[in-house]
Image: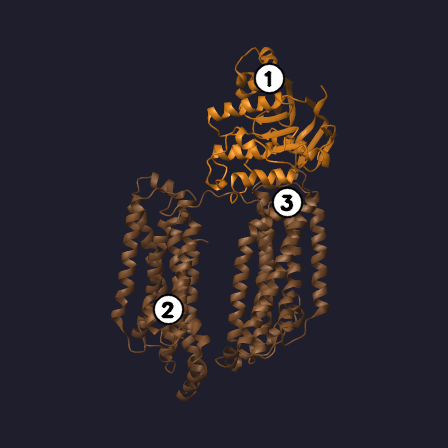
Amino acid sequence: MAPAVEFEGLTVDRGARRVLQGISGSFAAGRVTGLFGPSGSGKSTLIRAIAGVQMRVQGRLEVLGSQAGSAGVRRQLGYMTQAPALYEDLTVTENVDYFATVRGGQRGEVLERLQLTEQASQLVRDLSGGQRARVSLAAALVATPRLLLLDEPTVGLDPLLRRELWQLFRQLAAEGCTLLVSSHVLDEARHCDEVILLREGRILAQLTPAALAARTGTEDLDDAFVRLVEGE
Amino acid sequence: MDARVRTIAFVYAFAVYSYIQPAGFRSTYPTLADRIAFAHSFAGNAAIRLFYGFPYDPVTIGGYSAWRVGGTLAIAAAVFGVLAAVRALRADEDSGRMELVLANPIARRTAFSSSLVAIALGIALLWAAMTVGYVAGGLPVGGSAYLALATALVAAVFVGIGAITSQLAPTRRIALELGSAFVAASLLLRVIADTAGGAGWLRWATPLGWAEEMRPFTGAHPVVLLLPLALSTALLFTAARIARGRDLGTGILQARDTTSPRTRLLSSPTAQALRSERSSLIAWGGCFAVFGVILGTVATSVSSAGITPQVRRQLAKLGSGSIVSPRGYIALIFIFFVLAVCLFVCAQIAAARQEESEERLETLLALPVGRLRWLGGRILLGAEAALILSLIAGLFTWAGTSSQNVHIPLWQMLEAGSNCLPAALLFLGLSSLSYALVPRVSTGISYGLVMVAFLWYLVGAIAGVPKWLVEATPFAHIGLVPTHAFQTGAALVMVAIGAVAIAAALAVFKHRDLTGA
């Protein structure tokens, strides 16, 4: 299958700091790719670059066959930032509708899909953290994007909700959507088809969770990461 | 704002005001004949009573002070009371700090009463400030203390009202709005009581009226003191009882937290910006309209009396011409409309910055939303809102003057209003540019630029600074209509600088990284 995202010699500077150090790689369409690494390893910056909102990007970066940030790509993109980017003074439905309109599509069934029908007419400022995360995801999912970029979507959520979300990600991939999901909880790597391990702006490894376990000789993914770093 | 800073600012303003008025009255109207003439020309005017209340004895210095200072400061004291109560009893709760405080071994009752002690101290300071001001202004000590007490007790009553609204309302903002509504209603009752014939009894229905009924310096009625004392105690006692049984972050009145979706004004980022700024624009427009009507209405009476020749000379330096005529007075005051519109456009760019700092902009820009279209839309929105505000200022001031048979043509008042636009475009450009260049500090920079430019003009003109130095500020280049002609050349320069700054802002923003809070 053709890669959904492909990059070569990708370098990003933020301020005086070089956040991504000329990395190359690609990930396949219709799969869940996990982006793992400690805080400050460059996960968010890579996602921002793919989303086309990052400035001072050098190197080649192709998304869905076009250059990142081009108008054609942006129409097919769903992006969820780390902090839920929602309008507190609007209701759940209004928030989702707004993002649907901006993307030029319809609300569809996202509220049902994320079990938000009961909260549909509630103002976002009255929602709990978990509910906000789901609304934020709903806003990214409207108008069926081909590529979903999710920056730490499960952070701070309870285990039950985390599991439900990962099930949803799998389901979306089965429907043909490509997902790039970042997390710093390595345990979540088991839900991915493939993981990219980032450290200090470089790609440490890109492999399947099973290959990661085999290569490091441990089932514990945290241990596996430590061993990879030490073996560098 | 920090509670201490606010208290200090109020104390300072109260002390200065209660000194200036009696001192000024004494020097402006030295003889009894002067004062009687003043009482006839000025104190009998219904428009004046809107602000200051009913003058029982404007011929003596004490009676004049009780009317002019007591009447005005009572309103300020009411505002102080509501602000202090809501800040102390609600703000910490909404920001989550109260949860931390109560998690420590501090009983809820102690937290409540220690807040009240702090506020009581603030009110005592206000009382002392006014007393000192009056005494320094030459009034007897006993009467000064009593007049100051009449005003301070208004603050006490409104602390009680603020305490109650803090318990009733589900959020701090709503508590403040409810409290402000009580201040407005009390003022409205006083205005009706003081201006409408036969409605004097209504004074008993408002805490602001009680302060008048205490009759400082005009045959004191100290027994009236019991009314604010009793009401304030009762309100605080009730608030304390509610506070004990109420969960943090909730109110007796529940917030409207569900509503059916309204998708109007959600069709684009600019439409959404208009939707979220709509209530603020309506509030500004409402204030402009009310202020315009009042300005137009009182222009005749204010300009004809009460201003000493020396002050007139000082004000004439600001370029409005003689302020003894209604036209001159309106021309002078219109500079404040210009200032307000300039501050309004800064607020619009600050709202755009908030969209970025709260990361919503990042999401939008990943979607088919262009950077230029987004920022351009926000700037255009600010410019359109400035246009609407300047029209309102002109139109409603004209309505006010027309009601008083002052004949200033409508087109001329609209021209006076249009003076707001070049300056607003200039500061809109500079705010946008600072937003594009240094987003994190841009809000402070843009407000700072406006205030420095304005104070430069105000202080520079009056203090007799060399002309070329005063002319460094854009405010010095505004032709104050209707006494002066609109300065087309200067306006074009301001618009040109603004346009260049906007273009530069867009060019910089197109390639700059987004930054969080």
Residues at circles 1 and 2 in contact by the CB criterion of under 8 Å: no
Secondary structure category for the residue under label 2: helix
Instruction: Give the Cα separation between the discs numbered 2 and 3.
Output: 53 Å
Residue A7 coordinates in the image, percent (x, y): 72, 26
Q: Pinpoint the chain carrying mark 2.
A: B
Question: Does the rendering let one see residue B380?
Answer: yes
Question: Does the rendering let one see residue A70?
Answer: no
Q: Nearer the viewer, residue A46 or A131?
A: A131
Mark 1 belongs to which amino acid?
Leu
Per the rendering, the mark at residue B268 is 3
Residues at circles 2 and 3 in contact by the CB criterion of under 8 Å: no
Residue B147 coordinates in the image, percent (x, y): 33, 71
Q: Residue under circle 2? A: B130
Secondary structure category for the residue under label 1: helix
Per the rendering, the mark at residue A228 is 1
Mark 3 belongs to which amino acid?
Ser
At x 38%, y 48%, the residue is B253
Q: Nearer the viewer, residue B391 or A61?
A: B391
Give the class, few, some or many, for how many residues have Cα within 10 Å of label 3's Cα (few <14, many ≥20): some
Residue A217 vertical position relative to residue A195 in the rendered view, above or below = above
Residue B295 shown left or right of residue B479 in the figure: left
Q: Colour of chain B?
A: brown
